[in-house]
Image: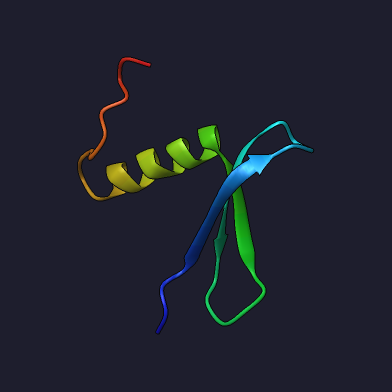
Amino acid sequence: MNPPAIDSHFNHKRGEYTHRIKKAGTSAFLLFNNDELLELQDLIDSALGGTTNDRSTK
């Protein structure tokens, strides 16, 4: 099974960086901006019982 592909670029229409996570073998994808991606990473870290990137000073 192939891992999901991540495509990150500056989206001029939205005026921000976006990150598209594509499901391998399909046309399905999830789209995140920088803030949403950081929030997702925090949720994953919390679910795993720790943090890999301390952003408590933001």
Task: Name which quarter of the figure residue 36 lies in.
Answer: top right
Relative depth, front residue between 25 and 46:
25
Q: Is residue 2 left or right of residue 16?
A: left
Residue 4 drawn above or below residue 40: below
Q: How many marks are shown on the rendered structure?
A: 0
Q: In this view, does 39 lie to the left or right of 56?
A: right
Q: Is residue 25 left or right of residue 1?
A: right
Query: In the picture, which quadrant includes the N terminus?
Result: bottom left
Residue 24 drawn above or below residue 12: below
How far across and down, in percent of the image, does residue 33 sit? 59, 39
How far across and down, in percent of the image, does residue 31 sit? 62, 51
Relative depth, front residue between 36 and 34:
34
Residue at position x 47%, y 68% in the image: 4
How far across and down, in percent of the image, does residue 38 sit? 44, 36
Task: Name which quarter of the figure residue 20 lies in.
Answer: bottom right
Residue at position x 30%, y 20% in the image: 56
- The image's colouring method is rainbow
Relative depth, front residue between 12 and 2:
12
Residue at the farthest right position = 13
Query: In the picture, which quadrant includes the C terminus?
Result: top left
Residue at position x 72%, y 31% in the image: 15
Residue at position x 42%, y 79% in the image: 2
Q: Is residue 29 left or right of residue 37?
A: right
